[in-house]
Image (cartoon, grey):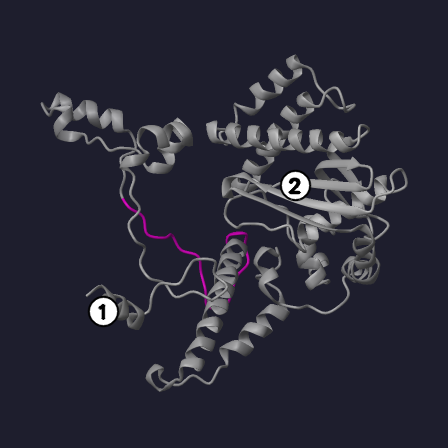
Amino acid sequence: MSGHALLSPSGASRWMACPPSARLEERFPESASSYAEEGTLAHALAEAVSSYNFRKYINAGITKAKLNKKLTEIQTSPYYDADMERHIDAFCKYVHEEYLASRATCKDAVIALEERLDLTEYIPDGFGTGDVVIIADSLLTVIDLKYGQGVQVEAENNTQMMLYALGALSQYGHLYAIETVRMVIYQPRRDNISAWSLPASELLYWAETELKEKASLAYDGAGKYCPGDHCRFCKARAVCRARAEENIKLARYDFAPADSLSVEEIADILKIGEKLINWFGDISGHALNEALAGTEYPGWKVVEGRSNRKIAEEQAVLTALTTEGYTQEEVCSVKLKGIGDLEKLLGKEIFNENIGRYVVKPQGKPVLVPESDSRPALNSAAAAAADFENIA
C-alpha cells in the first residue's frame, strides 16, 4: 500500500457522490496548505501525549523522556502555540475519560491510537487511520480529532467516520461481539463534540449495498460525473468538463432586467451567480498556474500585477533620518498588534482575563446568504418597524 489511499476516508463524501472524480484527481499533485500542516501538528501532539498517558495499556506507549523529546520537536513548529497545547490537552483528557468509562463497564476494554485500518474488504486498496479506537464488549467507539475551525463537522451520516468505524469493525469484529458502533468528532476550536451511534448491522448493510458499488466504480474511474457542493474540495474542479457544462447551462439563464424579475427568479439567479463566481475563481486560478508553467492561452498573457512601494531596509532608513536630525518620534509610529496576534502571544485564557473586556465586535454589514447558512436571520424592515411600535 502507498502512503495515501486513492479512495481515502477523508474524501469519501466526494468520490461516493461523483465516483469518476477520484481518478481524475490523480492528474494533480498533492498540495499541503497551512491549515493541513497545522492539523498534522495538532494530531502529532495528541498522539504523543496520549501515547504517554496510555503507556500501560498499549504497545506503542512512550516514556516521559521520549514524550519530552517529541514535545521539544513539536514546539519548534511555527504552528505551535499555547492554544494548541490547551486544546490538545483537553482532547487527551476527553479520550482518557472515555476510556476509563469503558473500563468501568468492561475491565478488558482495549484502546488503540493512530490505528491503521484496513478497508480492502469494501474498497480496493482502501485504508485509513483512526485517531482513537476503543472496544468495550459489544460497543466500538471511534474518536476523530478535527483541529480545523472553518466548518463545524457533525458525526451523523459522516462517511469518513463510517469508514473508520467499518475498518475498526473489520479489524476487531472477529475478536469481540460488537453490536453497536459509536462515532465521535472532537472539534475543540468550535467547542463541538458530535457523537452518533448505530447498530453494527446497519453499518455493514450500508457497506454492502452502497459503499462497495460506489468504491468499485470510483477505483475504475467509471460511473457518472455528478457536480455539486462536493466539488469544493476536488483537485480537478477547475478542469472538470461535467462541472463546466453544468455551469455553462446555468449561465444560459434567460436574464431580464432586474426590475422585471419576480422574487422567485431573483432567488434562483442568486444561487446561479454564486456557483458561477466560484467556478470562475477556480478556472482563473488554474489558468494562471498553468500559464506560469508555460501554457499559452489564446488571447491571454501573464503580466506583472500592480505593486506598492515599500522600504526594504528599515534600520538603514532610520539611521539615515536620525543622522539628518529627525527624532524617532517624528519618523516612527507604534501600533498595537491585531487581536489574532495578541491571542496567539498570550493564549486565549490570559487574553480573555486581561484584555477581553476591551474587545468589541461591531455589527457586521448585512449580507444575503442561502437559508442553509447557520447564522440567524436579521429582522426584516417590516418586523423592525413592528418592534419599534411595540416599544412606543
Span shown in magenta:
292-308
- Which amino acid lies under the numbered mark 2 shown in the image of this protein? Asp
Q: Residue 144 carries which label?
A: 2
SS for dot 1: helix
Mark 2 residue element = strand
Image point (49%, 63%), residue name:
278
Q: Crowdedness of circle 2 by 10 Å Cα count: few (<14), some, many (20+)?
A: many
Task: Tell me which corner region of the image, top left, top right, bottom left or bottom right, holds residue 138.
Answer: top right
Quadrant, the N terminus: top right
Identity, as a three-letter code, of the amino acid under mark 1: Glu
Q: In the figure, 17 relative to 153: above or below?
A: below
Q: Earlier in the sequence, mark 1 or mark 2?
A: 2
Could you classify mark 1 by the number of other residues whose Cα lies within 10 Å: few (under 14), some (14-19), or many (20 or more)? few
Q: Which residue lies furthest to the top in this view?
A: 65
Residue 66's spot in the image, x, y percent? Answer: 66, 16
Of residues 158 and 256, the one drawn nearer to the viewer in this rendering:
158
112 in magenta: no
Magenta region includes residue 299: yes
Give the residue drawn at x 47%, y 58%.
Answer: 374
